[in-house]
Image (tube, rainbow, N blue to C red):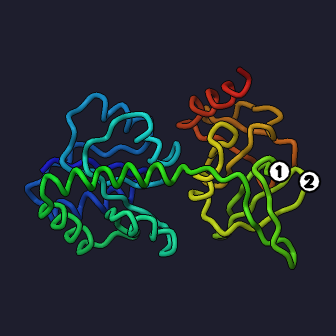
């Protein structure tokens, strides 16, 4: 069995590799990749592995983007830190997942489950992954949010940026108001228009309309300045700089 690991957290990748070597000592781990860009290039340049273990959130974006840029024919077992509520999407689609921190027995169960699947089952499994990816990127024009003692609709047009802090997620409007959201930042990113909103880093999703300018920052990174006040500096990591520039440029065409 040939395996591929897509994981951006060094400790998590090392832990999964160790578990796999224990659970499937005969398996060959082909590579460990930590970005969307490198994953796409790997799939384009190498034969399909028998099984892929894929983290959802990578250093340069969500791994769902990989499926949009290259045809992934291998079965995928997602690794995720999503809470139980968010995991219903996986359960509904019959997709296997491992909840972090990953345990050896869970990996053993997932591998054995895959080994028992027939060819038809595996084809169906792959189609379910495609369906999940499509659903994940379903755009939502309006959000119903709590504001003081009321529930009010807030449209994408009103959102300057989204920010996560202390396990809470907020959307900030151009009017200076802050709205607490009932979604993770990952889930929210999938609901917002990718043409208008960009996941700058682990804390921020920003609207192109809110961007004033961009400054070069230490370590080949970028600092983004917005029209509205922000709780901390928005730094685009080196791994996302090229993609960010393309996204920003596409709005000027």
Mark 2–mark 1 Cα distance, whole angstroms, equals: 8 Å
Q: Circle 2 is placed at which residue position?
A: 175
Q: For the residue carrying disc 1, how many other residues have a C-alpha within 10 Å: few (<14), some (14-19), or many (20+)?
A: some
Q: Circle 1 is placed at which residue position?
A: 158
In this rendering, position of residue 144 left or right of residue 36: right
Closest to the camera, between mark 2 and mark 1, is 1
In this rendering, position of residue 139 left or right of residue 30: right
Task: Give coordinates of residue 168: x percent, y percent.
Answer: 68, 69
Circles 2 and 1 in contact, beta carbons < 8 Å: yes
Q: Residue furthest bottom?
A: 149
Along the line of sight, the residue nearer the viewer: 107 or 177: 177
Q: Residue at x 62, y 41 (%)?
A: 194
Q: SS at mark 1? A: helix
Residue 83 vertical position relative to residue 155 in the rendered view, above or below: below
Q: Residue at x 40, y 55 (%)?
A: 55
Q: For the residue carrying disc 2, how many other residues have a C-alpha within 10 Å: few (<14), some (14-19), or many (20+)?
A: few
Q: Residue at x 82, y 42 (%)?
A: 226
Task: Give coordinates of residue 138: x percent, y percent.
Answer: 56, 51
Task: Give coordinates of residue 41: x percent, y percent.
Answer: 36, 31
Q: Residue at x 68, y 25 (%)?
A: 249
Q: SS at mark 2? A: loop
Q: Earlier in the sequence, mark 2 or mark 1?
A: 1
Q: Residue furthest top?
A: 253
Tell me the quarter of the image containing the C terminus: top right
In this rendering, position of residue 81 left or right of residue 46: right
């Amino acid at each position: 069995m040939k395996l591929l690991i897509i994981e951006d957290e060094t400790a998590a990748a090392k832990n999964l590799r160790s578990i796999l070597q224990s659970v499937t000592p005969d398996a060959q781990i082909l590579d460990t990749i930590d970005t969307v860009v490198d994953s796409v290039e790997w799939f384009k340049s190498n034969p399909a592995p028998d099984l892929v273990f894929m983290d959802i959130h990578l250093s340069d974006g969500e791994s769902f983007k990989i499926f949009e840029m290259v045809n992934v024919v291998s079965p995928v077992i997602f690794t995720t830190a999503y809470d139980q509520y968010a995991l219903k999407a996986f359960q509904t689609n019959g997709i296997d997942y491992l909840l972090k921190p990953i345990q050896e027995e869970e990996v053993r169960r997932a591998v054995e489950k895959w080994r028992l699947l027939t060819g038809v089952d595996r084809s169906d499994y792959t189609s379910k992954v495609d369906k999940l990816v499509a659903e994940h990127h379903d755009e939502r024009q309006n959000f119903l949010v709590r504001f003081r003692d009321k529930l009010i609709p807030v449209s994408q047009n009103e959102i300057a940026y989204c920010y996560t802090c202390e396990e809470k997620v907020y959307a900030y409007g151009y009017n200076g108001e802050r709205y607490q959201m009932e979604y993770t930042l990952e889930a929210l990113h999938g609901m917002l228009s990718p043409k208008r909103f960009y996941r700058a880093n682990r804390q921020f999703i920003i609207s192109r309309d809110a961007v004033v300018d961009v400054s070069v920052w230490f370590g080949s990174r970028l600092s983004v300045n917005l029209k509205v006040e922000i709780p901390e500096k928005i730094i685009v990591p080196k791994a996302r700089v090229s993609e960010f520039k393309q996204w920003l440029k596409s709005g000027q065409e």
